[in-house]
Image (cartoon, coloured by chain):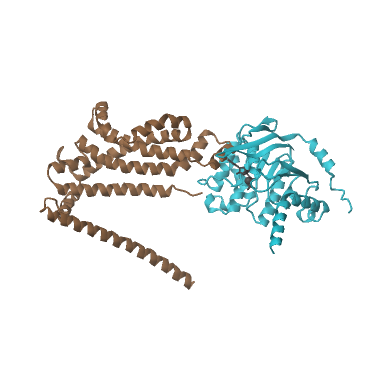
Chain colours: A brown, B cyan
Amino acid sequence: MDKSNQQLGATALKVVTYRTGRFLYFLLGMSFMLIIWHISSLSTDGELPGPIQTFSVFYDLVSHPFFDYGPNDKGIGNQLLSSLERVTKGFIIGSIIAIPLGLIMGSSTLGMNLLNPMVQVLRPVSPLAWFPIGLVAFQSAHTSTVFVIIITSLWPTLINTAFGVSTIPQDHKNVAKAFGFSTFKYITKVMLPYTLPHIITGLRLSVGIAWMVIVAAEMLSGGVGIGFFVWDSWNALSLEKVFSAILIIGLVGFVLDKSFKSLQTRYSYDS
Amino acid sequence: MIANPNILSEDKVKENILLRPVSIEIKDVTVSFPTPKGEYIAVKDINLEIRKGEIISLIGHSGCGKSTLMSTISGMVKPSKGEVIVNGKKVTGAGPDRGIVFQNYSLLPWLTVYQNIYEAVDSCIKNISADEKHSIVERHLEMVNLTPHKDKLPKQLSGGMKQRVAIARAFAINPSVLLLDEPFGALDALTKGSMHVELLKLWNLDNRNKTIIMVTHDIEEAIFLSDRIVVLNNGPAATVKEIEIVGLPRPRNKKDIVNLPEYKTIRERLLNLLVEKFSIEDEGVKFEE
Ligand SMILES: Nc1ncnc2c1ncn2[C@@H]1O[C@H](COP(=O)(O)OP(=O)(O)OP(=O)(O)O)[C@@H](O)[C@H]1O
Ligand SMILES: [Mg+2]
C-alpha cells in the first residue's frame, strides 16, 4: 500500500516536473526571441517596432476588438471573424467535395485512373492562381476568396482520404464479404471507420493551409479580413499592427491545428 | 482385444456417410498465388466430398495450405483449377450460407463485441425484426460467456476472448456450413473443452444438419469432434495425404473415449503421419550428444 502510494507520488512528480520543464523551455525560447527582436529593433533605430511598442498596440487592438466605423476602419475581431467565416465556408465546401471524391478514388481503379492525373497536375498550383478565375466566375471578391479556399482545402483531404481507402486491410474486406455486408453497410461499417483517421489528417492539413492562404487571398481581395488588415496596416505604415496581426494569425492557426489534432487522437483506434 | 459393439467398422461408417446428401464437393482444386518469383502453388489436385452434417478436421503442418483451402471453400480465394460446389451450387464468392471463423479472428476494431456480432446477423438474416436479431446476438454472447464484455472493443480483449467473439459471430448467422480455421487455438484447455461441448450442442440442436470443417493442430480435439480427419501433405503443392475415419460412437465422452483402443489406434496413426519429420530432427539431436 505504502509502496504503491510512493510509486504514484513518484509518477505524479515526474509528470509535474515534465510539465514545468516544458514550460521553462517555452519561457526560455520566448525570451530569446523577444531579445533578438528587441535588438533588431534597436539596430534599425526603431524603424522596425520592438516588442514593447508592438505589445502596447496589440493591447489596444484586442481591448476593443469589435467596432465598425466604415469600410477601412473595423475592429480586429471583425476582421478575424470575417476571415474565419470565409475559411469555414471554403473549408466545408471543399471537404464536402474532397471526401466523396477521395472515397471514389481510393476504392476503384477506374476512379483512381480518372482522377489521379488531374489531381497531380492541379495540386502543385498555388491556390491564389484561381483568384482571377473566381472573380470572373462569381463577379465578387468575397466569393472568389471563398473559392480560393475551396480549392486549397481540396487536395490534402482528397489525397489522404484516397490513401486511407486504398489501404483498407484485406482482413476487413474479407469480413464484409464473408458476412454479406451490403454496399451501404460496407461503406458505413468498414470503409468510413477505417478511413476516418486518414480523413481527419487530411482535414487538419487542409485547414492549416487554408488559414495560410486566406491571408494572401485577402491581400488580393481587399475589403475586410485579417489578410486585408495586414496589408492595410502596411499601407498605413503601422508595422506594430502588422506584427500584432502576425501574432493573432499564429495563435488562431495554432488553436485550429490543436482542435483538429484532438479530433485525430479521439478518432484513432488500434486493432 | 474385445470388439466394442458400439464402435462402427470403417465400412459401416462409410456406408452411413453415403446415406446423407452431399454438402461440399471439392473437385480437382488447385490454388496458386502469383508471387514476385513466379506462381506459388499452395494446394494441388484436392478432391474431397463432404456429406451434409459431417464434421471434418483438416490437419497438416504450418504453411501447408489449410487456410488456403478454407478460403477457397468460403469463396474468398478462387481456385486456379477445379471447382468447389456447396449445396449444389458452384462457389463463385463468399456467402452467408457459409459461416467462417478466420484464423486471425478478423473482428472490426471500431465495433464493440456486441456490434461485431450484430452487424453480421443484421446482414445475413433477413426477414426478422430487430428485436429478434438482438436476441440472437444476446443468446450467442451468452453461449461464449462474453455477455459481461459485450461493450468492449476488440483491443480490450484477450486472444481467447476475440476468438470466442469470432465463433459467436459465425454461429449466430446460422449457416449450413461452418468453416472454422483453428477456432480454439488460442483458448486454454478448460475453455476449449467447454467450447467443444458448445459446438457439438449446436450441431445436435440442428439435427446434425450443419456441415463443419475445422482446421486444427490438436490431434485429440480432431478425434473427439470429427467424423473424418483429412491430413494434408507439406506444401508447396500440398495434396491430401490420408483421410482417417473416426468410428467412435456419438455422443462421445472425452474421458471415456481416450481409453478406447480404437482411439489409441487413430491417435497413433495420425501421429505417425504428422510427426515423422520431427523424429528425424530428434535423431540429429541424439547424434550430437
Ligand atoms: N495471398 C497469398 N499470396 C501468396 N502466397 C500465399 C497467400 N496466401 C497463402 N500463401 C502461401 O500459401 C501457403 C499456405 O498458406 P496457408 O495460410 O494456407 O497455410 P496454413 O496451412 O493455414 O498454415 P498455418 O497452420 O500456419 O495457419 C503458404 O506457403 C503461404 O505463404
Ligand atoms: Mg492457417
Quarter of the image that includes the N terminus of chain B: bottom right
Tell which quarter ligand 1 is in.
top right
Residue B180 seen: yes
Question: Within the image, what quadrant is residue A36 found in?
Answer: bottom left
Please state the total of marks drawn on the protein image.
0
Q: Is residue A221 above or below residue B144?
A: above
Rendered location of residue B51, percent (x, y): 75, 37
Which image quadrant is residue A5 in? bottom left
User: Going by the picture, which residue comes out furthest to the bottom?
Assistant: A2
Residue occupying image coordinates x 67% and y 53%: B192
Relative to B158, A63 lies left or right: left
Front position in the image: A38 or A186: A38
Observer-nearest of A197 and B151: A197
Q: At 52% from the left edge and 47% from the top edge, which residue is drawn?
A: B109
Q: On the picture, is A79 further left or further right than A266? A: left
The residue most toward the front is: B287
Residue B127 rendering spot, x and y as whole percentages: 60, 33
Q: Quadrant of the C terminus of chain B?
A: bottom right
